[in-house]
Amino acid sequence: MLRILDVNLNRIGEGLRLLEDVTRFILNDPELSEQLKNMRHELLPKDRSLQKRLLKARRASEDVGAFLDVDSEAERTDTVSLVSANSRRVQQSLRVLEELAKVHGDDFGLDWDKFKHARFALYTLEQKIVLELLRHNKKEKVSGLYVIIDTQALRGRSELEVARQAIQGGARIIQLRDKLRPKGMLVPLARELKKLCAESDVLFIVNDYIDLAIDSDADGLHIGQEDLPFDTARKMLPGDKILGCSSATLEEAIKAEKEGADYIAVGSIYPTPSKSGTRLAGLKILRQVKKKVSVPVVAIGGINEDNITSVISSGADAVAVISAVLGADDVKEASQRLTKIINRGSAK
């Protein structure tokens, strides 16, 4: 009995510590980290006499199952699978202790109800951690060439084919922007673009329309200062989706990050014909924002082959373009040229 208690308490402590470290050092989430820390301290025995009895009962070298090969161990190829595996490990041990405590709880001062509540709490925590990790992984991919598929700039060409050529040319992010057609007409297009991007390991972002982003399972949503309120968008979006926000001033960028923005789009860097009435931010604001925020910074507005080097040297993690790619006869070639400049500048 003591050996069963010992091994399951050890699993709980080890598994919760890994989850705590992931939320603390990878996600930088103080709330989740604190919850896991409190759970770990609450579940592990504080009774010194019980600790001594458990230690004396330990027979690690005699454990017949200690070195059995488990096929699923090789499946932990990323942090998400690691979190899921350790969450299940803790949940299973909690269930073991819950059942044993119903029979032997009085002998060891164990409360089966405490283990049950902890198990159900961990189900929710696991979901939150996994969703945050998926969102974190997407945020980490915000870099390089960001191509906005604006239907008004396609010159009669297919959105899907233009996106495919841009991806072949090195685009890391594709955004769908359409202010003219009804959203119902955009649903099949958004779904096809999502499929294309997923096959190429490219992020797919929807501009403005949160319902379209959710329906198409887009990787994220991009909104402007006059669109859906930022905190509302963050609450409505699933936890694994990234949210980007346009900013023309340092104050707007800082506010967006505080409210949960996963990346900041600074612009317009240069005057642009793609969006009338846009405010000019310039390279100075871009540099200021890059110094003050910790999320990726996307430069947007009037960027082309002639000025993109200055944009990269000013700190932009990604460069969003419309005309520089969609205005070219050969979308793939235009994307390749911009990607080479970005890569060359980022390597310095």
Image: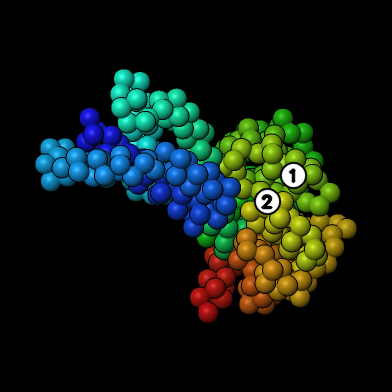
Secondary structure type for disc 2: loop
- Rendered residue at 74%/34% (across/down): 183
Q: Label 1: few (<14), some or many (≥20) within 10 Å? A: few
Residue 205 visible in this rendered orientation of the protein: no
**Quarter holding the N terminus?**
top left
Q: Residue at x 32, y 31 (%)?
A: 108
> Left or right of 296: which side holds 141?
left
Amino acid type shown at disc 2: Gly
Residue at 69% over, 36% down: 236
Left or right, residue 79 beside residue 24: left
Q: Along the line of sight, which residue is nearer the eye, 297 or 70?
A: 70
Which amino acid is tagged 1? Asp
Assess whether mark 2 and mark 1 are in contact (beta carbons under 8 angstroms): yes
Q: Position of residue 191 (x, y in %)?
A: 59, 36
Observer able to see residue 253 = yes
* Of callouts 1 and 2, the N-terminal one: 1
Residue annotated with mark 2: 260
Residue reaching furthest front?
49
